[in-house]
Image (cartoon, rainbow, N blue to C red):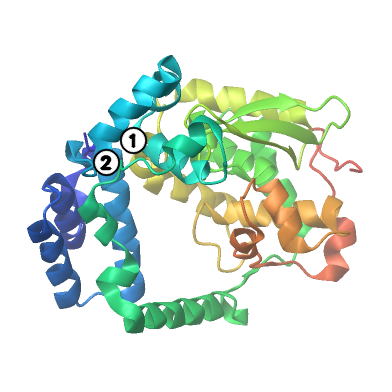
């Protein structure tokens, strides 16, 4: 069922309520789709925001397994495939959840033969769900308008007055990362975010972190967040730099998690605790960075510091992609909003719990 519905309805806007109700009432009929079209046509919301809502509605329906509805040919195809592939069909298809099935079908188009090639045309997705695309609901003119709105939003994001400026990077690092030695979650939390560049949920529960013996400032991290086409059992993993030694980071992470053993999902970590998380980060950063407004900005700041310390021989967005475990450098380019005066770069060192920065 719709696990997202566990969000408190009291804090939803009317718009969000509409879409949760649309998802719950999905019955794979043209009448249902026409209701969505009317809502989109009559809505006063800007087109770029409507794109977000449409994508959100699609995500809700996928998570709800389309309320049990399937494509017209699905059952007959399913019988044929099961007869042909036997236990392999159950293992590779039936055992998957709805989100993983969608990812699996998208990946199957890369195969020319075998089970994956056989299953790629499986009529799993209901007919009316296929009508929930931005092209079909908004039209070509509106899509052009969306692109222009996003272009202007990006231009504004990267305008000089909106960039995140850190004029004293050595002071910034020492002030925020000193929280790694603390027992207080209000200073531990922002320090862990900055030291690793991990997402909020990864800090609370999501990431598995292991040392890289050959380098004290590197960490092997496994994450189950934002995995793209990876299935539920496939962790996103990679080696990233840390702005402190691994042993220091790992000890601080263990202390922090021991304070919140009950938090085991993103809703608890990012949504329920969102206001408190933001308060901690704003206080930790203080006036040491201009335009700092949210916890997520510490990911961009982390990436910039790592680039200065270890990545200057690469293109910045390529290095960011590697450090932030992104799937594309286009996504990583959105994080190039942190500016640190080049004349201060020589003062930057990884943080040390002994009070003096060490050479990387």
Position of the N terminus, as image quadrant, is top left
Residue carrying label 2: 4
- Please tell me whether mark 1 or mark 2 is closer to you in this view: 1
Q: Is residue 177 left or right of residue 255?
A: right
Relative to 357, residue 210 above or below: above
Residue at the top extreme of this rendering: 87
Measured as percent of width and height from the top left, residue 156 is found at 52, 80
- In-front residue for pair 284/82: 82
Residue 98 disc label: 1
132 left or right of 340 in image: left
Label 1, label 2: how far apart the Cα atoms are: 15 Å
- Residue toward you, 144 or 310: 144
> What is the x, y in percent for residue 203?
55, 35
* Nearer to us in this view, 36 or 287: 36
Tell me where residue 358 sits by quadrant: top right
| Sequence-first tag of 1 and 2 | 2
Residue at screen point 62% across, 50% down: 326
Using the rendered view, name the quadrant where residue 80 is placed: top left
Q: Residue sitting at 53 percent across and 53 percent down?
A: 296
Name the secondary structure under disc 2: helix
Residue 266 visible here:
no
Residue 50: image quadrant is bottom left
Relative image position of residue 107 (x, y in whole percent): 52, 43
Residue 163 sits above or below residue 96 on the image: below
């Amino acid at each position: 069922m719709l696990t997202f519905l566990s969000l408190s309805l009291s804090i939803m806007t009317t718009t969000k309520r509409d879409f949760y109700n649309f998802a719950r009432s999905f019955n794979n009929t043209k009448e249902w789709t026409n209701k969505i079209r009317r809502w989109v046509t009559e809505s006063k919301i800007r087109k770029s925001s409507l794109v977000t809502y449409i994508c959100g509605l699609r995500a809700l329906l996928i998570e709800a397994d389309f309320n049990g509805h399937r494509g017209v040919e699905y059952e007959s195809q399913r019988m044929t495939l099961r007869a042909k592939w036997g236990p392999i069909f159950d293992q590779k298809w039936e055992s998957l959840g709805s989100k993983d099935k969608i990812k699996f079908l998208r990946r199957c188009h890369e195969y020319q033969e075998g089970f994956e090639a056989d299953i790629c045309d499986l009529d799993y997705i209901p007919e009316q769900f296929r009508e929930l695309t931005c092209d079909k609901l908004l039209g070509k003119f509106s899509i052009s308008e969306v692109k222009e709105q996003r272009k202007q939003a990006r231009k504004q994001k990267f305008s000089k007055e909106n960039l995140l400026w850190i004029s004293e990077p050595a002071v910034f690092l020492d002030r925020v990362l000193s929280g790694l030695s603390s027992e207080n979650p209000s200073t531990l939390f922002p320090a862990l975010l900055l030291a690793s560049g991990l997402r909020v949920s990864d800090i609370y529960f999501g990431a598995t972190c292991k040392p890289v013996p050959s380098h004290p400032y590197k960490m092997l991290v496994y994450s189950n967040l934002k995995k793209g086409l990876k299935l539920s059992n496939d962790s996103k993993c990679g080696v990233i730099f840390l702005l402190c030694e691994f042993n220091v980071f790992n000890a601080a992470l263990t202390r922090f998690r021991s304070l919140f053993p009950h938090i085991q999902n993103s809703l608890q970590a990012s949504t329920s605790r969102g206001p408190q998380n933001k308060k901690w980060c704003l206080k930790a950063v203080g006036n040491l960075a201009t335009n700092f407004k949210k916890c997520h900005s510490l990911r961009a700041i982390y990436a910039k510091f790592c680039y200065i310390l270890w990545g200057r021989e690469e293109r910045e967005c390529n290095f960011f992609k590697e450090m932030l475990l992104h799937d594309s450098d286009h996504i990583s380019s959105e994080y190039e909003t942190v500016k640190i005066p080049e004349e201060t770069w020589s003062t930057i060192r990884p943080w040390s719990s002994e009070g003096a920065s060490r050479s990387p």
